[in-house]
Image (spheres, rainbow, N blue to C red):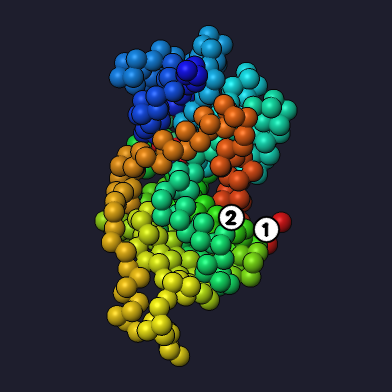
Amino acid sequence: MTSKLRFGIVGAGVIGKMHAEALSNLPDAELVAIADCVLERAQKLGESFKATAYGDYQEMLEREQLDIIDICTPSGMHGEHACQAMRAGRHVIVEKPMEITHAAIAEMLRVQKATGVKMAVISQHRFDQASRKVYDLVQEKAFGRLVMGNAIVPWWRSQAYYDSGAWRGTWALDGGGVLMNQSIHSIDVLQWLMGPVKSIYAYTDTLVHKMETEDIAVAVLRFANGALGTIAATTGAYPGTGTRIEIYGDKGSAVIADDNLSYLHLARDESEDDTVGLYGLAKEKRQQGMITKEETGRAAQDPAALAIRSHILQIADMMRTIREDGTPLVDGNAAKHPVEIILGIYESARTHKEVVLS
Ligand SMILES: NC(=O)c1ccc[n+]([C@@H]2O[C@H](COP(=O)([O-])OP(=O)(O)OC[C@H]3O[C@@H](n4cnc5c(N)ncnc54)[C@H](O)[C@@H]3O)[C@@H](O)[C@H]2O)c1
């Protein structure tokens, strides 16, 4: 039997707890230690999962023999905490966003290369069944020429949510608002399916909450493959309805709604009586592409109500990568583009100019 991989978590907040739960579902993972600068938080989580608690992250790194550190601290600390672990020879699983500035991301990639350890960045929705299926269909060119890709995130977060942590809604540590924190998941899946974004024009604003960063953003995108698209996101849409990711091509369409494949129609699957007229499919035929939902996450209203399954799959992917000396599905290079898109949106909104990504 292979020995268990030994995990440490830094950051015992909302997502740190989810990592602990995910690890307890993986038989060849062992959660050994948890660090939080608020020692009581580490202790509380440590008691539940039988892990040693530390009030000092560096002390945890020095004292414990750990294979992997899960970085679950505020977003603007990911780089510093990941680099500390990598320099100590540990592999890292970094929560999203990878970091909040180009410089911090470049430094993480540099340190990873220099130390030779592995880094995965949580992008759990790439592990959802629906997005994997659409991704495979895109690889098969089943949608034909991709023409449009949209991500729509009409969520709700209360003022109490933003007030629940001093870092939330700040430029220094959250790195942004609805885009950098909540919508990065959908932006990540959108660019994974549609390919990289080449240029952006955007508006952002703060309409509902008292916070530094944006609670609404609308962006127009040009993808490198020539397709167009949009991102429309807010945390000011009470009570918070579902996320939609829409992929349209000249041979098919797919809609992922609330992480489920809610619509799929491909020309290649049509039978003879499905003839598409001058104006497209008749309504009753269109409805045949509607797929019944299997599972609905409640993340649109509640950040703690995340489905845990995709986190488990992504952590398992990293463990396999370490055992087989491979590359994780979402490594640092794969995780940086969503942040580049978001930083491009901020720049366009600030300068009122189109931003071309290099
Ligand atoms: N993948 C997802 O779906 C998902 C969901 C929620 C949050 N997140 C990400 O997880 C990260 C944390 O978010 P959260 O909601 O859990 O925040 P949180 O405020 O609930 O938890 C953060 C924890 O980090 C601790 N901390 C801060 N500075 C520290 C330091 N220097 N050393 C040790 N501990 C320190 C805090 O005391 C706190 O307990 C963010 O980057 C966020 O974007 C991801």
User: Compared to 246, does 67 lie above or below?
Assistant: above
Q: Nearer the viewer, residue 323 or 22?
A: 323
The residue furthest top is: 63
The residue furthest front is: 272
Label 1 sits on residue: 357
**Residue visible at 65% across and 64% down?**
224
Regarding residue 176, the answer to whether it shows in the image is yes
**Residue visible at 58% across and 45% down?**
335
The crowd level at tag 2 (other Cα within 10 Å; few <14, some 14-19, many 20+) is: many
User: Compared to 318, does 203 lie above or below?
Assistant: below
Label 2 sits on residue: 341
Tell me whether circle 2 and circle 1 mark residues in contact (CB < 8 Å): yes
Percent from the top left, x then y, of residue 172?
Answer: 54, 39
User: Picture quarter containing residue 67?
Assistant: top right
**Residue visible at 44% across and 26% down?**
11
Amino acid type at circle 1 is: Leu
Amino acid type at circle 2 is: Ile
Split into quadrants, the picture shows ligand 1 in the one at top left
The residue furthest bottom is: 278
Cα–Cα span, label 2 and label 1: 8 Å
In the image, which disc is placed on residue 137? Answer: none
Q: Nearer the viewer, residue 265 or 354?
A: 265
Q: Is 304 displayed left or right of 148 in the figure?
A: left
User: Compared to 310, does 356 lie above or below?
Assistant: below
Percent from the top left, x then y, of residue 16?
Answer: 40, 29
